[in-house]
Amino acid sequence: MRQPTTIRRRPFAALAAAVLTATLTVSGCGAAGSSAKDDSADKAAAAPHQADAKGAVDAPSAAPGTAKGATTKTPVPSQNYVVRTATLSVEAKDSVAAALASARTTVTGAGGYVGDENTSRDSQGLEHSTITLRVPPDSYDKVLNDLAGLGRLIERKVSTEDVTSQVVDVESRIRSQQASLARVRELMSRTTQLSDVVTLEGELSTREANLEALQAQQASLKERTNLATVTLVLSEPEHPASAPPPKKDDGFWESVGNALGTGWHAFYVTLRGILIVLSVALPFAALGLAGWFVFVVVRRRLAPPAVVPDGENVTAEAVTGE
């Protein structure tokens, strides 16, 4: 008799567990003070909140974050957003410093500003400078013409990029992300379960980081479209090589005088060279002569006396006696 009773209660226990789980979920999202007697009413009232919680917690953090059934309308751009860039290579008329001063005056007068600057000299001593300028789009063409007039234009390169679709996409994603954050904060204000609070806080941090990244991208796009970028490369003009003096056609006597002058100069140079060589060699010659004299004296003193034969001595004495 007990076995059928046990079989009948197992489905009831499973159903009760499911109802209890649904009750806890519903009470954590929007019906914290409800009792078990009002399970059916709580489930009906909390169904929309469960959908929001699922969209806010279970959805991937990289998605813009829209709840089920919600639709986002793509905004229509009020204008075209274009990024303009240009590069000008100009050989300055006089000096690079003067051309740089004129470029700064032109850009600031048009409402722009001067960015990075790099000035150097090459192996020939010529000055080169590269400067980055930010110019409003309304004055873009006029500023380019004024900068090209700073000297001889060597190269001009202009490019444009339409980023309207990127701007619209980023704005739409920002609005969706802001709406998603508002829903997550609303759910956090109503939930009482610690596990749900922890999950929602993690999701909130992730979506706040995504929103900040989108806002930074939006600021970068606006900065690039609000001001055009012009890179100006200035170079100093090369100095013309000095021409050799014209060759004169000398006369006869002038040629003779030039030849005598050249010969006298050669004689003077030769004589001066000889005197220089003698002056350098004189101390060594004096030292060598003194050494040779000492050597001769010492050799004579150390040499033995000469031996004379007897016959020669008798003859010498006889000659002396006579």
Image (spheres, rainbow, N blue to C red):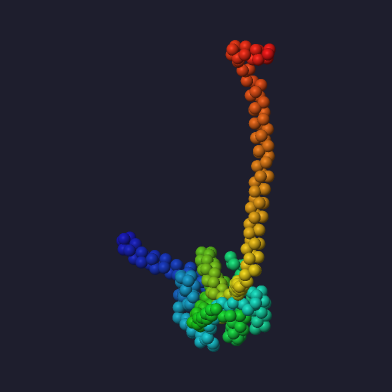
Q: Is any atom of residue 12 visible in this view?
A: yes
Residue sitting at x 66%, y 55%: 268
Q: Is residue 213 left or right of residue 319?
A: left
Location of residue 286 by image quarter? top right
Q: Which residue occupies the foreground of this view, 261 or 88?
A: 261
* Residue 152 as seen in the image, left or right of residue 15: right
Residue beneath the point at 67% across and 76% down: 98
**In the orientation shown, which residue stands out farthest toward the front?**
322
The residue nearer to you, when weighing 220 against 122, is 122
**Position in image of residue 246 (x %, y %):** 61, 73
Q: Position of residue 300 (x, y in %)?
A: 65, 23
Quarter in which the N terminus is drawn: bottom left
Q: Residue at x 65, y 77 (%)?
A: 94
In the figure, 123 relative to 114: above or below? above
Residue 285 picture quarter: top right
285 and 39: which is toward the camera = 285
Q: Nearer the viewer, residue 264 or 196?
A: 264
For the C terminus, the image quarter is: top right
- Which quarter of the figure has residue 281? top right
When the figure is inspected, residue 143 is found, relative to residue 61, above or below; the finding is below
Across and down, in percent, residue 85 comes to 54, 79
- Judge left or right: residue 250 versus residue 9: right
Q: Is residue 167 visible?
A: no
Q: Where does the image place residue 80, in percent across and percent down from the top left? A: 52, 86
Name the residue rendered at 46%, 71% in the picture. 59
How many numbered markers are drawn? Answer: 0
